[in-house]
Amino acid sequence: MSEDGEALSRRIDKWFWCARRFKTRSLAARFITEASVRVTRGAVTQRIDWPSFQLCEGDVVSYILGERLYALRVTGFALKRGSPTMASSLFADQSKSPPLDAPPPCKAGRSR
């Protein structure tokens, strides 16, 4: 804990739950175990498959959910799950890709 009572790290399953990415901690833990979740810390990226992995501020968590690739930079931690506004302050969305099966963008106008 830091001097002001904030945690310096948090279990990834609890962070997913507090950040409102999953409805329950058990769903978050199962997703981490069964899906491909990656954490980039510094210049090192590693696959995470255990819910007790400790996230640190500045880590980038990447995963595919549905047809979309997410990349979330950890900006903070919460002691408990709060409002959606508070949850959105725990990460910065760095996702730049459209859904994986998205059709190519349409061209303006009609061609004959």
Image: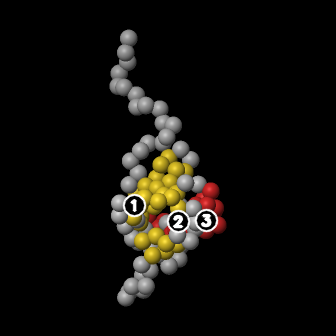
Q: Which mark is residue 10?
A: none
| Residue 109 can be seen in this image | yes
Q: CA distance from mark 3 to mark 2?
A: 9 Å
Residue occupying image coordinates x 35% and y 21%: 109
- The three-letter amino acid code for the residue at tag 2 is Phe
- The three-letter amino acid code for the residue at tag 1 is Val
Q: CA distance from mark 1 to mark 2?
A: 21 Å
Asked if residue 78 is positioned above or below residue 111 in the image, the reply reads below
Split into 4 quadrants, where in the image is the N terminus? bottom left
Task: Give the residue pinned by disc 3.
Answer: 29
Residue closer to the observer: 30 or 75: 30
Task: Give the residue pinned by disc 2.
Answer: 16
Asked if residue 2 is positioned above or below residue 77 in the image, the reply reads below
Direction from residue 111 to residue 39 in the image, left or right: right
Report crowding for label 2: few under 14, some 14 to 19, many 20 or more residues within 10 A (C-alpha): many
Q: Measured from the top left, where is residue 77 in percent x and y?
A: 45, 74
Instruction: Name the front one of labels 3 and 2.
Output: 3
Q: Measured from the top left, where is residue 78 in percent x and y?
A: 47, 75
Q: Residue furthest top?
A: 112
Looking at the rendered structure, the secondary structure element under dot 2 is: helix
Q: How many marks?
A: 3
N-terminal of the pair, mark 3 or mark 1, is: 3
Q: CA distance from mark 3 to mark 1?
A: 23 Å
Q: Which mark is residue 44?
A: 1
Q: Which corner quadrant of the image does residue 97 belong to?
A: top left
N-terminal of the pair, mark 1 or mark 2, is: 2
Asked if residue 32 is positioned above or below residue 10 in the image, the reply reads above
Q: Measured from the top left, where is residue 106 in percent x and y?
A: 40, 28
- The three-letter amino acid code for the residue at tag 3 is Ala
Direction from residue 24 to residue 19 in the image, left or right: left
Residue occupying image coordinates x 50% and y 79%: 79
Looking at the rendered structure, the secondary structure element under dot 1 is: strand
